[in-house]
Image (cartoon, rainbow, N blue to C red):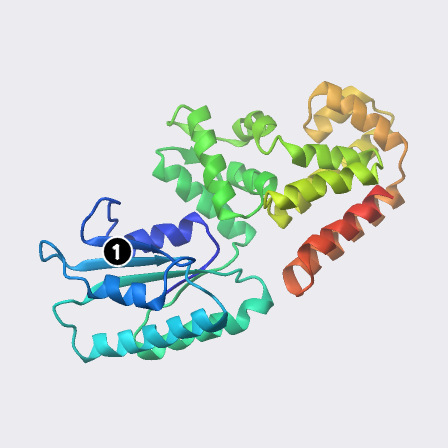
Amino acid sequence: MFLGGRDPRLRAAVASALGHPEPGDLAYTRLDGARVSVDDLAAACGAASMFGERRRVFLDGAASSGPRARALAAWLAAFGDAQRAGPGADACDLAVAVYLDLGDRRTAARVKTFDALKRHGAQVHRFGPLREGEAARFAQAAARDLGVDLSGAAAARLVELVTTDAGLLASEVQKLAAYAGFGGRIDVRDVAAASATIGEHARWDYVNALADHDLTRALQVLHDMLALRTPHQMILADIIMTLRRLAAARQVVNEGGGGREVARAAGVPPGRGQALARQARRMSDRLIARMYAEVVRTDAALKSTGSDKDALLEILTARLAA
């Protein structure tokens, strides 16, 4: 059993458990959990292999709740007991992936249901949210797999830009490896140079609308991003990065600096530095601190409560735009 979100760690573990089968392997069957029934799964596991090889079956995206999940759990328990009693000629290697947000307490009961299969011989592997240090090490490992050395500082900066989402990190590491020519070493300067293309889409329209106090536009872009399944923590990370740059700009402005100095301090292009300097002059240190406090509260709520995550970001958007 593989429990967790749709990220590279889970998919790689499934492939490893099944021996990295090719899609055209006649002894390998992949089933779509949203479309098949327990009877379909039983038929796939019981089918005789054409050439006598051991069968391998992957149920991808199994039902995680409701009657279908309960029926699946019961079948898997019986399957495991039968395997332990003595596999027959039609025995198979079976992998079941259930996509759950392990960082959400509301899924605890579902996780418990599948954990109970351990009593029937199942191995249950969990892939929960990565912490920052784990995410940086994951990025470095992904870079090594591509023949690239990603420095610790560069990995930490990449996590700051992209968040700890494993799928997003793997995608950006591939881009950085291409940027570096699939060889050599990637340091913080390389990440900074490539960061102009990391996430340059509607997310920046969103933070720009917040900076302009345009609530209608900010909510419109937010809803577009949520419809496209942009991770909540990535949106929050963009806001945090913007506030950090704004705080740096405010410090420079307080010391008498201008757009050029702001650009250097905030790590942005000169044109953006001028805009940040103008924005910083219109704000106070107390206001920026209050904005940070709103973000911290939202971050804690996203990670530790069962509240509607879309609604939490809508509320944060309204407060920041005001």
**Residue shown at 31%/57% (left/top)?**
58
Residue 254 seen in this snapshot: no
Name the one closer to the observer, 110 or 103: 110
Name the one closer to the observer, 158 or 80: 80
Determine whether 96 is above or below 120 in the image: above
Residue 17 percent location from the top left of the image: 28, 57
Q: Quadrant of residue 250?
A: top right
Q: Amino acid at mark 1?
A: Leu
The residue pinned by badge 1 equals 18
Of all residues, the one furthest to the left in this rendering is: 51
Give the quarter of the figure containing the N terminus: bottom left
Residue 318 seen in this snapshot: yes
**Residue shown at 52%/27% (left/top)?**
190
Q: Is residue 34 left or right of residue 228?
A: left
Determine whether 33 is above or below 209 in the image: below
Name the one closer to the observer, 71 or 302: 71
Q: Quadrant of residue 178?
A: top left
Residue 289 percent location from the top left of the image: 83, 47
Q: Is residue 255 left or right of residue 134?
A: right
Q: Is residue 201 left or right of residue 134?
A: right
Q: Is residue 307 left or right of residue 177?
A: right
Determine whether 229 is above or below 249 in the image: below
Q: Residues within 10 Å of mark 1 (few under 14, many from 20)?
A: some
